[in-house]
Image (tube, rainbow, N blue to C red):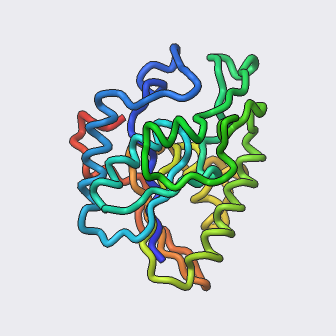
Amino acid sequence: MELYLIRHAQSGNNANPAQRVEDPSLTRLGHQQAARVAERFTSAGITRLFTSPFRRALETTAYLRQATGLTPEIWIDLHEQGGVMRGTDPATYVGCAGMTRDEIRAEFPGYVIPAEIDERGWWKGKPFEGLEAAQTRAERVVQQTIARFARSQERVIFVSHGTFIRLLLGAFIGYPILQRNWLGEVWNTAVSTLLITPEQVQMTSFNSVCHLPPEWIS
């Protein structure tokens, strides 16, 4: 399989972290970035499109949906490390619900929504998720991805988040970032590509933003 890990486009929290909210939308620049990265995949032969349930990822995925003609599938485990948190200080974060099933249906009709997302949302007010727990989740995603797709010719997109993409990459190549912080910042809509077979995983690109003009990189 070929796997494309795409970070969501710029959100309000990226642009103004001092005024962060628990589930921000994309900024104007974010919508421009999302449109550009989608153009990159118009003729790429993508066969599956998975997304985190955060609003910024769902909005980014809408552009990829239009470009590929695919039905987006929400995969809760692709969410950002931490979860849905209200507040600006990690010491006082309050867990929130996340978007509910009805909210997603209304704003993103046609997306495949897992049964776990109900009227209580998808995060359901759980406490902050630490890095070690997120690392375990990344390893679970890797195991499931290899089991489902490694023997296939599928070309798959995961729309996810900066920290979690770094955790995923480390887990895929067997070099967890918790042991050594060897990956830097992941840009908004950056594309990292992996070739995955049952025998090996090869990273063929990391943090590619060739689809963006320099002034749009964030």
Q: Is residue 127 left or right of residue 145?
A: right
x, y percent for residue 110: 43, 52
Quadrant containing the C terminus is top left
Q: Residue at x 58, y 43 (%)?
A: 163
x, y percent for residue 73: 51, 57
Q: Nearer the viewer, residue 178 or 36?
A: 36
Q: Residue at x 49, y 42 (%)?
A: 105
Q: Is residue 167 left or right of residue 91?
A: left
Q: Residue at x 21, y 42 (%)?
A: 213
Q: Is residue 2 left or right of residue 40?
A: right
Q: Is residue 180 left or right of residue 35?
A: right
Query: What count of labels does the image hold?
Result: 0
Q: Nearer the viewer, residue 8 or 186?
A: 8
Instruction: Name the image quarter holding residue 96.
Output: top right
x, y percent for residue 32: 26, 37
Q: Residue at x 70, y 61 (%)?
A: 139
Q: Nearer the viewer, residue 118 or 147?
A: 118
Instruction: Name the image quarter holding residue 176.
Output: bottom right
Query: Which residue of the protein is positioned furthest toward the left in this rendering?
Result: 213
x, y percent for residue 131: 73, 42
Q: Nearer the viewer, residue 151 or 191?
A: 151
